[in-house]
Amino acid sequence: MSAFFEPWQSHEVVRVHRGDAPLIVSLPHDGYALPDDIRATMVDAARHSPDTDWHVSRLYAFAIELGATLLRPRYSRYVIDLNRPPDGAPLYPGRNETGLCPLSMFDGQPIYVRGHEPSPSSVAQRIEHYWRPYHNRLQAEMERLRAQHSEIVLWEGHSIRSECPMFFEGVLPDYNLGTADGASCRDEVLRPLIVELELRQRRFVANGRFKGGHITRHYGNPSQGVNAVQMEMAQSRYLDESEPSIFQPPLARQASDDLCRLLQIAIDTVTKARPRRS
């Protein structure tokens, strides 16, 4: 497990821990680093990557023990958003959202110094250097596991501030499951997760404000044995939102326990549903 959390090497843009269970945990917004040349074009506030999905790789560290494959990026979503389509098409037309190379932070303030926003050629370079490697590795791991299992789960681990007026009113439920309104995942896989959250009396919603981003929608294909589920967690569930850059295990313990149970249920569901490939 330690290698997954070692300091990054200069050449790395994505890190993968390989497991053999029918489960991939993708953490596309876990990164917070900024290349020096891009950092130099940003306003001071953006240089701290405040809209990171803070510590989700730590939160999901238990998944290694479940035999899951985990992917995490090195760089911030401000460099390029790995959960957006490469053509920049909106996920929620008509609603506020950030794009492939976002220009504003979640509080609406600009990311870049005026006149230093990324050009079309810069965006194209970022796609090749940062976006495509993550997706190539994700695709390769999906193909590897699909060669072993008749059905797998692609779990998208995300988090966001519990109150973020740019995207939603009021306070976000603790757990927000998204399956593109059922298109990315069989109901037989989603339903036991809902039942578990109900039994635990957690605040949750399925396919509410967050229905799943590009990765969930693009790779989820139940007819081909790939069930994609996005979990968008309210950060208040596992950290002190006044100090989000500090990971505090005591605060995160219950959330990790909840997630561990959900992922084990997901593994059990797809394992029992179809026979293992020989």
Image (cartoon, rainbow, N blue to C red):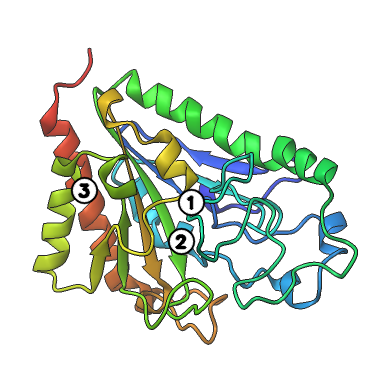
Reading the image, the residue beneath label 1 is 27
Residue 106 falls left or right of residue 201:
right
Frontmost residue, 120 versus 202: 120
Residue type marked 1 = Leu
Q: Residue furthest top?
A: 278
Residue at x-position 36% and y-position 73%: 252
Across and down, in percent, residue 212 comes to 40, 51
Across and down, in percent, residue 43 comes to 81, 73
Across and down, in percent, residue 248 comes to 45, 77
Q: Are marks 1 and 2 in contact (CB under 8 Å)?
A: yes
Q: Is residue 192 visible?
A: yes
Reading the image, the residue beneath label 2 is 56
Find the distance from the CA under tag 2 to the CA under tag 3: 17 Å
Find the distance from the CA under tag 3 to the CA under tag 1: 18 Å
Across and down, in percent, residue 217 comes to 41, 41
Task: State whether residue 232 is above or below residue 66.
Answer: below
Q: Is residue 179 visible?
A: no
Residue 28 falls left or right of residue 277:
right
Residue at x-position 86% and y-position 63%: 41
Q: Residues within 10 Å of mark 1 (few under 14, many from 20)?
A: many
Residue type marked 2 = Val
Residue at x-position 22% and y-position 16%: 277
Sequence-wise first label, 2 or 3: 2
Residue 38 falls left or right of residue 65:
right
Sequence-wise first label, 1 or 2: 1
Sequence-wise first label, 3 or 1: 1
Frontmost residue, 89 versus 211: 89
Q: Of helix, strand and loop, which one carries label 3?
A: helix
Q: Residue furthest bottom?
A: 242
Residue type marked 3 = Gln
